[in-house]
């Protein structure tokens, strides 16, 4: 059976390993209008996480048979950095 002694402790003396209490959130920062070529954009920092979002369009619907006057199609692309850095 595998030993669990090498796992880091996540809770120490009632606080998380980074010093936050159990009900404390990470710091959150939001900066709008960060991309010049987007209709709207934001950079969100939540602790060590960074999220960059941009809105482009409207654009012509392809394929044409998906086009409608009564609904919209939202296409999203998600990318995650393939590395870990501190």
Image (cartoon, rainbow, N blue to C red):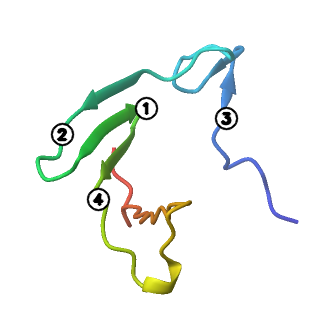
Q: Nearer the viewer, residue 3 or 30?
A: 30
Q: CA distance from mark 3 to mark 1?
A: 22 Å
Disc with the residue nearer the chain's start (1 vs 2)? 2
Q: Nearer the viewer, residue 83 or 59?
A: 59
Disc with the residue nearer the chain's start (2 vs 3)? 3
Residue named by callout 1:
46
Residue 34's label in the rendered image is 2
Residue 9's label in the rendered image is 3
Q: Nearer the viewer, mark 1 or mark 2?
A: 2
Q: CA distance from mark 4 to mark 3?
A: 46 Å
Tell me the SS state at disc 2: loop
At horizontal 20% and vertical 51% (from top left) the residue drawn is 38
Q: Residues within 10 Å of mark 3 (few under 14, many from 20)?
A: few
Q: Position of residue 21 (x, y in %)?
A: 63, 13
Q: CA distance from mark 1 to mark 2?
A: 16 Å
Residue 23 is left or right of residue 36, and the answer is right
Residue named by callout 4:
57
Q: Position of residue 79 (x, y in %)?
A: 40, 64
Tell me the SS state at disc 1: strand
Disc with the residue nearer the chain's start (4 vs 3)? 3
Q: Are marks 3 and 1 in contact (CB under 8 Å)?
A: no
Q: Nearer the viewer, mark 3 or mark 1?
A: 1
At horizontal 47% and vertical 75% (from top left) the residue drawn is 67
Tell me the SS state at disc 4: loop
Q: Position of residue 5 (x, y in %)?
A: 73, 47
Which quadrant is home to the N terminus? Answer: bottom right
């Amino acid at each position: 059976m595998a030993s669990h002694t090498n796992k880091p402790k996540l809770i120490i003396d009632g606080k998380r390993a980074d010093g936050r209490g159990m009900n404390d959130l990470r710091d959150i920062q939001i900066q709008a209008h960060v991309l010049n070529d987007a209709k709207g954009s934001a950079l969100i920092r939540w602790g060590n996480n960074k999220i960059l979002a941009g809105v482009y369009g409207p654009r012509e619907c392809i394929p044409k048979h998906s086009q409608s006057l009564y609904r919209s199609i939202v296409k999203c692309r998600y990318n995650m950095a393939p590395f870990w850095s501190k």
